[in-house]
Image (spheres, grey):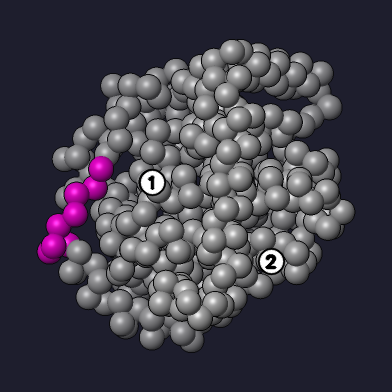
Amino acid sequence: MLSVVYFHCKTIRNAANITANFEKSRSKISHFRPQKSEKSSAKSWRYSRNTLQKQQSLPVRPIIPLVARISDQNASGAPLMMVREKTRLDKFKQLLASPNTDLEELRKHSWSGIPREVRPVTWRLLSGYLPANRERRDLVLQRKREEYFGFIEQYYHSRTDENHRDTYRQVNLNPIHIDIPRTNPLIPLFQQPLVQEVFERILFIWAIRHPASGYVQGINDLVTPFFVVFLSEFVEEDVENFEMASLPLDTQRNIEADSFWCMSKLLDGIQDNYTFAQPGIQIKVKALEELVSRIDEDVHVHFQKCEVEYLQFAFRWMNNLLMRELPLRCTIRLWDTYQAESEGFSHFHLYVCSAFLIKWRKEILSMVDFQSLLMLLQNLPTIHWGNEEVGLLLAEAYRLKYMFADAPSHYKR
């Protein structure tokens, strides 16, 4: 059966058709869960000190800007495409308007991308922030937004009080202050003081509510897709240059609170990525190495010849969920699928990273030394990617999951 699936995927060229075919059988797949072992864990981190020393001499890749617009890239003047997109949008609206939204059906339709018009409410539902019952949604939103700003009043506004010094000692604001200006630095929206204050409050409250990890560098990136999607409810185009201060205060507060809660829901599923020593990332990087060694041995051996360790490039892929490797519009499309896929952020992401790496096999094999290969891996040319490229990437990731999720003997050597 696997060979048939493989042949099927290799012969279909249209991303939409590939995704549609995959959706039909997606419910049959259970996720592979890489097992943590002390031996492999120790081995995977033995070289970490040398890794950091080598990387210090390499240039850091700038964060990719939005590039023109956030809106969907799959709009077309072709009448057939326009009819198809309208039909999809109508189906979403029908699901969302029902008294009790069928979340499984919503996930099924969201896997291949969510129309921009309904993305905010769909993300709130898929993340578990909103209930399926339509009548309860407004009350839940009101309660959760009030709860968030209760945290702001209780913790953030009193953070400098002498009486609370011991309570807040665990939250070091310095890394947050360092990271926030680095959040998409080429996008004017994220350089506005008002927006940076929003991010500081979100990250501070999350850190104080999660003392096991506190704030970890890179979590700031995970706020941005939610923030942009919820902002897009009020801005049709040119989000990257929008003046946040022009929105009513209540709207600003709602965007902030919703971004906090949805980011928190995401992080709940990958919490071990950010606890001490980041064991979740340890396991995932090792799992990526083992999977790639089975998928494409030539690439794996080439890394060994050039003395490139997976940790040197894949740590960022796991820590930032590929956000530093893709334009933000592509991240948003990717997260449509992650939120539709069961355990998308925690498990399906592994297969996306594998597919993403093999996508560049030709370029990887053309590099002949450590320096050039690692520079390539840290500066992959995705600046012009859109929905079509992301759709193909997800289709290949799904194929890999289909082949390996239920076959652990295929996964490991």
Residue 370 versus residue 343: which sits nearer the camera? 343
Q: Which residues are magenta?
A: 33-40
Q: Main secondary structure of the magenta part?
A: loop
Q: Look at the image and tell me whether residue 365 can be seen.
A: no
Residue 328 versus residue 376: which sits nearer the camera? 328
**In this rendering, position of residue 130 left or right of residue 248:** left
The amino acid at mark 1 is Gly
Helix, strand, or loop for circle 2? helix
- What residue is rendered at 20% in x and 64% in y? 41
Helix, strand, or loop for circle 1? loop
Q: Position of residue 49 (x, y in %)?
A: 31, 82
Q: Residue furthest front?
A: 163
- What residue is rendered at 54% in x and 56% in y? 151
Q: Answer above or below: position of 186 versus 24.
A: below
- Residue 222, by quadrant, is bottom right
**In this rendering, position of residue 400 left or right of residue 388:** left
Q: Position of residue 212 (x, y in %)?
A: 33, 63
The amino acid at mark 2 is Gln
Residue assigned mark 1: 269
Residue assigned mark 2: 196
Q: Is residue 34 part of the magenta span, yes or no?
A: yes
Q: Answer above or below: position of 177 versus 195.
A: below
Q: Are marks 1 and 2 in contact (CB under 8 Å)?
A: no
- What residue is rendered at 54% in x and 72% in y? 159
Q: Position of residue 134 (x, y in %)?
A: 60, 20
Q: Position of residue 285 (x, y in %)?
A: 32, 59
Q: How dense is the environment of label 2, judged by Cα within 10 Å: few (below 14), some, or many (20 and up)? A: some
Q: Is residue 255 part of the magenta span, yes or no?
A: no
The mark nearer the N terminus, 1 or 2, is 2
